[in-house]
Image (tube, grey):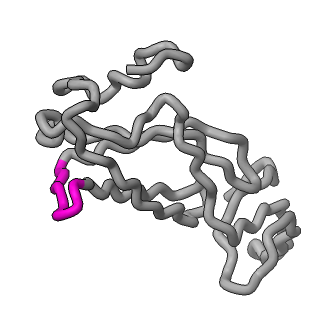
């Protein structure tokens, strides 16, 4: 039971408009009305600009960190991250890192990031947070 009638974010059905709704339900011999935010759209991820989409061949075995800001209707921006610890170099010399994250309503953002495998990339070893520990204006 929702004692405060505060708003909730719920996943909308396909074709439904995103936005605020009043949801009225019978509750025994009473009627309860709640303010709901129906979210039908997936969130959008903006990759942290410090993350470089390049990886040294020696670092492939350690995995890769994707971090960015998740923007979603009905909720404020939030920093999200995901670590992919199983990387495979393809024939073209790239690694594909799949990113998937659900917003509070259950809508998913899905995006693949392609990393160039390059011996000129910084060797970061097992430190997946290497780029995030650097000043944002500096290279390497």
Q: Is residue 36 left or right of residue 110?
A: right
What residue is drawn where x is 84% and y is 66%? 19
What residue is drawn where x is 54% and y is 33%? 49
Quarter of the image for the C terminus: give it.
top left
Magenta-colored span: 86-93
Above or below, 83 relative to 121: below
Instruction: Name the magenta segment's main secondary structure.
Output: loop
What residue is drawn where x is 17% and y is 42%? 60
Q: Nearer the viewer, residue 70 or 97?
A: 97
Residue 30, visible in the rendered structure: no
Q: Is residue 90 magenta?
A: yes
The image quarter in which residue 105 lies: bottom right
Quarter of the image for the N terminus: give it.
bottom right
Q: Is residue 124 left or right of residue 81?
A: left
Residue placed farthest to the front in the image? 120
What residue is drawn where x is 41% and y is 16%? 133
Q: Where is residue 68? Give x, y as percent.
A: 53, 39
The image quarter in which residue 122 lies: top left
Q: Nearer the viewer, residue 93 or 114?
A: 93
Q: Is residue 88 left or right of residue 69?
A: left
Residue 73, visible in the rendered structure: yes
Q: Where is residue 34? Give x, y as percent.
A: 83, 62
Q: Is residue 11 magenta?
A: no
């Amino acid at each position: 039971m929702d004692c405060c009638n505060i708003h909730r974010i719920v996943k909308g059905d396909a074709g439904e408009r995103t936005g605020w709704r009043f949801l009225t339900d019978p509750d025994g011999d009473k009627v309860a009305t709640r303010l709901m935010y129906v979210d039908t759209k997936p969130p959008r991820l903006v990759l942290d600009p410090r993350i470089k989409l390049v990886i040294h061949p020696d670092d492939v075995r350690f995995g890769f960190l994707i971090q960015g800001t998740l923007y979603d209707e009905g909720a404020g921006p939030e920093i999200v991250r995901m670590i992919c610890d199983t990387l495979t170099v393809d024939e073209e010399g790239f690694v594909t890192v799949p990113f998937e994250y659900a917003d509070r309503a259950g809508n998913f953002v899905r995006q693949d990031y392609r990393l160039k495998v390059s011996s000129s990339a910084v060797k970061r070893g097992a430190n997946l947070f290497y780029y995030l520990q650097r000043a944002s204006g500096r290279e390497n």
